[in-house]
Image (tube, helix red, strand yellow):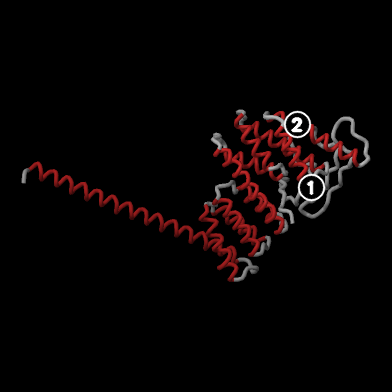
Amino acid sequence: MSRRRREKQIKALSNFISLTFFIFLSFLIGSSSVFSLNETLDEQLDELKNILDSSSSYSEFQKNQMLLPALQKVLNSGISFAETREIVEKGVSSSFDAYNMKKVLDILQETKEEDLPVELLINKVNEGLAKSVDKTTIISVISKKAENLKKANEILREAQQEGLEIKDGEEIIRIIGDSLENDVPVESLSWLIKSGLQQGKNLEEITEISEELSYLSLMAYDAGLSPDKIYLLFKQSIQSSTLVEQVCENIQKNLEAEISSNRIGLGETKPSSSTGGGATSPISITGEVSSPTAIEGTPAQEAGEAPTESGSAPEPPELPGGDSTTPPES
């Protein structure tokens, strides 16, 4: 055997040994990481179990068969341990029953797994638990908010499928979700995103237009228009122009005409200028009804202003913080 050939064989053997050692080392590191993660998860679940054990409200079945498996899924979905622990601690301190606690955890897990901004829901849960809001109200609010986030994500995906470039996708989902809570028709928001992007609108401009649509929608509900009527009004206004700004003006104009027509039909005097409309009294989280606005009173905001948290159409119970959410209709 020539010296040169022998050197090649030794070099090949050396490379093989190095590669084998590298693979073995990687396996050890990977196994160690998995073991460490499992150990950490087990420690986190033990800590959460200790919190559950501090309450006499939960049976062994509820803790071991319901809540701990749900908590494990929440942690595996990517929701942080700190956020999960805070929910459990507040749930225990406010005597939140196991079945409704599991509903909350399931909603949070599903929202996170769909890569939606779950922090919005977590904040609502913590606000409600901290102030002992009725459990059914908390679940209703976060269920509706989760549903609106899913609808907003669908609108975004449709725009992407049509070839539109989406920047700040998560923020747009938040914006659309807020407008859906104010009962702006889904079709109108889909039109806004597609037309706005096609017309080169930036995130700030889309936000302002979305808020304006929310204001107009609430104004329509204050005037007593049905959801079907509002949907048709928005649809007709959108079909009458391709410019986003013009559509908002068309909605305002058509809304004023509709309200005037309704009042004349009721035998009232046709208003000479601004649109009037009595707001249905919103229900607070305590169940109290605030003083109604006079039917002949003018809206709290002038047309064209962005909607505020006050003076709106029929609203659901609110969680503390002023962020209202429309719960599912019964």
Q: Residue furthest left?
A: 1
On screen, residue 168 versus residue 330, left or right, reads left
| Residue at which label 1 appears | 314
Q: Position of residue 274 (x, y in %)?
A: 85, 32
123 and 265: which is toward the camera: 265
Q: Which residue ends up furthest to the bottom in the rendered image?
A: 60
In the foreground, 210 or 310: 210
Label 2 to label 1, Cα distance in Å? 24 Å
Q: Residue 266 location in percent, x, y?
A: 91, 42
Say which element carries label 2: helix
Q: Which residue is mark 2?
A: 250
Q: Secondary structure at mark 1?
A: loop
Residue depicted at 77% across the width and 48% down the height: 315
Left or right: 35 as drawn, with respect to 226 = left
Q: Is residue 68 left or right of residue 124?
A: left
What amino acid is at disc 2? Asn
Horizontal and vertical percent for residue 186? 67, 43
Q: Can you say whether 204 is above or below 187 in the image?
A: above
Could you tell me residue 127's position as x and y percent? Answer: 68, 51
In the image, residue 64 sits, relative to residue 185, either above or below, namely below
Closer to us: 263 or 120: 263
Marking on residue 141: none
Q: Residues within 10 Å of mark 2 (few under 14, many from 20)?
A: many
Q: Quadrant of the C terminus?
A: bottom right
Please tell me whether residue 3 is drawn above or below residue 108 in the rendered image: above
Residue at 70% x, 45% y is 181
Callout 1, which amino acid? Pro
Asked if labels 1 and 2 touch by Cβ distance under 8 angstroms, the answer is no
Closer to viewer: mark 2 or mark 1: 2
Q: Quadrant of residue 301?
A: top right
